[in-house]
């Protein structure tokens, strides 16, 4: 049984509601986002160091990178501790200051099946939809069903992992099973998504793992799709990763049939966020509570937001997409022309 660490949302007076329209569902309700976010953000910030609480666009690169690590740890703990549908995701603003965001889940009814999207609410000063190549990114219900099969005992964890897959790594096109598909690398494996491209949206129809991919043709030069916030799409002028190298890495993982990482075990230690936050000076101690690989590495006080040859190094996972934010408001280290 999971430890209920985040009991500040379990108050009988705080009932999380959904919002139903004629053609859509939203969860949580839009009018509740501010109230829920205020409670969550307060719970996150109270125990962390003052240098993180005060962080704004003037903060050093080291502070911004460390705040991202702390926020990712908190979101991982929150999503792993709760079995309801509330999801959190850590997102940097265009100023590179990371916000705890509530993932508002959007369901759009349609005659051909329901579609699902996400809105990220980070308080009154920062909210965003993450777009792909200038278009909305929507999922068919079958994508959600596939992820839930892989996490049968925890639908909340399945959704959390799906959001991490969609919004943290580069998107490319490859010929999979004889058809063009969007592919994405997610350590230590890959996923392929059959898709439909419409005028204003990409619709992901299903999700294939390495065992469901029977043929993989390298498409060179690589076609890249960029994740971004703004409605207007401009290909970023700076790329911090090598698309050809990333494509070959995906192909290598397919050849090796690299499996998915096993799901996180339910939390058994009765340690709340207040206690864990005091340990953040030694980030390795968070390794037992979160899958965020960055938290297993020591911070360098003088580290800069930079990427060395496009490689994610000790100081580069946050830095990789931070550099892209700075230049072109791009997420996930995704840059270059489409």
Image (spheres, rainbow, N blue to C red):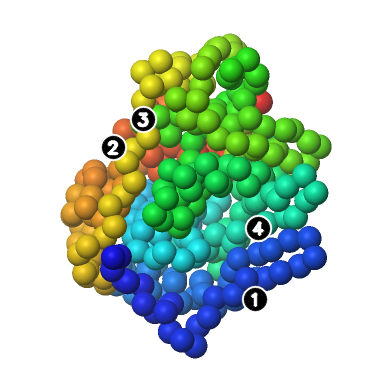
| Mark nearer the viewer, 3 or 1 | 3
Among numbered discs 3 and 1, the one appearing first in the sequence: 1
Q: Is residue 179 above or below residue 167?
A: above
SS state under label 2: loop
Q: CA distance from mark 2 to mark 1?
A: 40 Å
Q: CA distance from mark 3 to mark 1?
A: 41 Å
The residue under label 3 is 259
Among numbered discs 4 and 1, the one appearing first in the sequence: 1
The residue under label 2 is 314
Name the residue rendered at 31%, 49% in the picture: 264
Q: Nearer the viewer, residue 71 or 299?
A: 71
| Mark nearer the viewer, 4 or 1 | 4
- As drawn, the label of residue 31 is 1
| Mark nearer the viewer, 2 or 4 | 4
- Contact? badges 4 and 1 (CB < 8 Å): no
Q: Residue furthest bottom?
A: 13
SS state under label 3: loop
Among numbered discs 2 and 4, the one appearing first in the sequence: 4
- Observer able to see residue 96: no
- As drawn, the label of residue 281 is none
């Amino acid at each position: 049984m999971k430890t209920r660490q985040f009991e500040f949302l379990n108050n009988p007076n705080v009932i999380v509601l959904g919002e139903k329209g004629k053609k859509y569902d939203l969860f949580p309700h839009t009018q509740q986002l501010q109230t829920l976010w205020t409670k969550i953000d307060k719970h996150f910030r109270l125990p962390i160091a003052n240098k993180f609480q005060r962080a704004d666009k003037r903060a050093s690169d080291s502070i911004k990178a460390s705040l991202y690590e702390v926020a990712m740890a908190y979101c991982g703990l929150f999503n792993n501790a709760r079995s309801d549908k509330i999801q959190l995701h850590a997102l940097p603003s265009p100023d590179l200051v990371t916000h705890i965001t509530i993932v508002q889940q959007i369901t759009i009814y349609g005659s051909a099946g329901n579609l699902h999207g996400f809105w990220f609410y980070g308080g009154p000063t920062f909210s965003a939809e993450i777009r792909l190549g200038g278009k909305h990114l929507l999922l068919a219900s079958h994508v959600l069903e596939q992820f839930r099969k892989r996490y049968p005992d925890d639908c909340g964890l399945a959704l959390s992992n799906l959001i991490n897959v969609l919004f943290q790594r580069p998107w490319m096109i490859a010929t999979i099973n004889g058809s063009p598909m969007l592919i994405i690398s997610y350590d230590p494996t890959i996923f392929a998504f059959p898709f439909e491209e419409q005028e204003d949206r990409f619709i992901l129809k299903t999700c294939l793992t390495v065992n469901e991919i029977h043929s993989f043709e390298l498409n060179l030069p690589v076609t890249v799709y960029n994740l971004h916030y703004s409605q207007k799409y401009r290909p970023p002028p700076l790329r911090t990763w090598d698309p050809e190298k990333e494509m070959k890495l995906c192909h290598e993982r397919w050849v090796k049939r690299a499996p998915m990482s096993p799901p996180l075990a339910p939390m058994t230690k009765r340690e709340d966020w207040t206690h864990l936050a005091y340990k953040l000076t030694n980030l390795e101690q968070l390794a037992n509570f979160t899958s965020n690989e960055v938290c297993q590495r020591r911070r360098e006080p003088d580290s800069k937001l930079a990427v060395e040859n496009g490689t994610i190094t000790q100081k580069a996972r946050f830095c990789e997409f931070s550099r892209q934010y700075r230049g072109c408001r791009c997420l996930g280290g995704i840059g270059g022309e489409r």
